[in-house]
Amino acid sequence: MQKTITFGIPCYNSAKDMDRAVESILEGSGYADDVEIVIVNDGSKDETPAKADAWAARYPDIITAVHQENGGHGMAVLAGLRAAHGAYYKVLDSDDWLDAAALTEMLELLRGFLSRGLRVDLFVSNYVYEHVADNTRTTINYKSVLPRKKIFGWSEIGRFKPWQNLLMHSLCYRTDVLRQADVPLPAHTFYVDNIYAYQPLPRCTTLYYADIDLYRYYIGREDQSVNEQVMVGRIDQQLRITRIMMEAYHLDDDVSEPRLRSYMYMYFTMMMAICSVFSRLSQAPDAMDNLARLWADLRVYDIRMYHRARHGLLGTGTNLPGKLGSKLTIGLYHLASKIFKFN
C-alpha cells in the first residue's frame, strides 16, 4: 500500500533525542497507517540501532529501521528516500520535532490532494527556531511571498526576503520529484540541506503553501552545525556544498521561470556570501586562497552568475577589500546575526 507521506529521520548517535522526533509524528498523525517513518541509523555507536529496531518492532506497519555504515547526513537522507513508500517525503532531523496540530492539518491537505487526483510537487510550511540562549522563538513564514489556500506555480510567487529562504525544514517534496532530481548529497559532508532545498526546485511545477508552524528545532547550542565556531571549522565543507550548487545550473539558461530564477539567484548569492564571511573568520592558512579559487571558478563557469553574486549588495558587503574591509564584513555579519538570530 502506498503511504501518503514518508518521514525520513537520519540518526547518528541520536539515542537521547530520537524518541521525541518519532513520538511527535506518531502522536500528531494519530498513529495513522498511511504515514510511514523511516529511521535511518547512520552507523551510530550508541543505543540508536537498538532504539530504531525497538520502534520498528512496536509499530511494524508504520516504522521501518534502516541500518547503514556511517556516511553522513546526506547519505542518511537518501537512504530514507530509497526506502520510502509515501507519495510525499519529508526529512525530520532526530533532534527536532513536529507540532501535532500542524501535522494533523498537513496530513488532511495531502490526503485531499491524493484523493482528488491533484498533483502538488512541493508542499511548503513554516518552521520555528526555539532559541536556547534567551528562551525565545522565531517563526519563519511565507505569508508575504506565497499564495495561500490554492495550488500555484512559480509565476505567482512574490519576492523573498533574505531570511525567508525555503529550507529543508519548510519543504515536503513529492517523492517521485526527489527521485527524478537525483539530488547530489555528498558523503561525510555537513550543510547538504542547502543542496536539498535548491537543486530540485525547477522540477517542481505545482506548489501549495500552508501557513502552519510545523517544524520545530532548537538553535544556539554549542554543538550545532550552524554554531558560528563550528561553521568556521567546517569552511571547507561549506565551500564544497556551494560549488555543487554552483554547478547544478547555469541559472539564466536552465531556469526558465523568471521568479524562480530570481529566488535561486538570491539563495546562491547568500551561499557565496556565507563562504566569504566564514573564510575571513577562519584561521586556516589556505581559507582565503580556497575562497578566491571558488570565485574564480564561478567566473569561468558562468560570468552572469558571477556578476550577480559578486557585485550585488550582499556580494559587495561580504567581500570588502583589505584588512579594514574584512573587519567591516565580519562586523556586518555579527550585527545581522544579532538581529535575525540565525545562529
Image: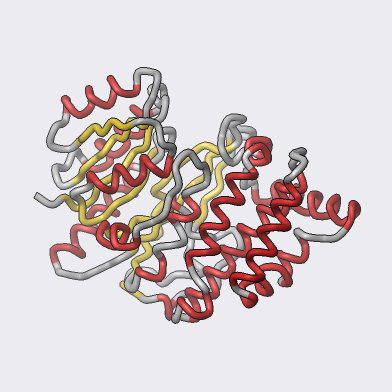
Residue 98 in view, yes or no? no
Residue 94 in view, yes or no? yes
- Percent position of residue 246, x then y: 55, 63
- In the image, taking residue 83 as reference, residue 340 lies left or right, namely right
- What residue is rendered at 66% in x and 53% in y? 274
Q: Give whichever of 107, 246 is nearer the camera.
A: 246
Q: Is residue 91 above or below residue 329?
A: above
- What residue is rendered at 44% in x and 81% in y? 256
Q: Give whichever of 123, 237 is nearer the camera.
A: 237
- Percent position of residue 231, x then y: 63, 41
Query: Which quarter of the rendering shows the C terminus?
Result: top right
Q: Give whichever of 342, 277 is nearer the camera.
A: 277
Q: Residue furthest left?
A: 1
Q: Is residue 103 above or below residue 154?
A: above
Q: Quadrant of residue 136?
A: top right
Q: Give whichever of 117, 139 is nearer the camera.
A: 117
- Percent position of residue 154, x then y: 42, 76
- What residue is rendered at 77% in x and 66% in y? 316
- Percent position of residue 206, x then y: 32, 72
- In the image, taking residue 282 as reference, residue 174 lies left or right, namely left
Q: Is residue 17 above or below residue 311?
A: above
Q: Number of numbered discs present?
A: 0
- What residue is rendered at 33% in x and 27% in y? 19
- Color theme of the render: secondary structure
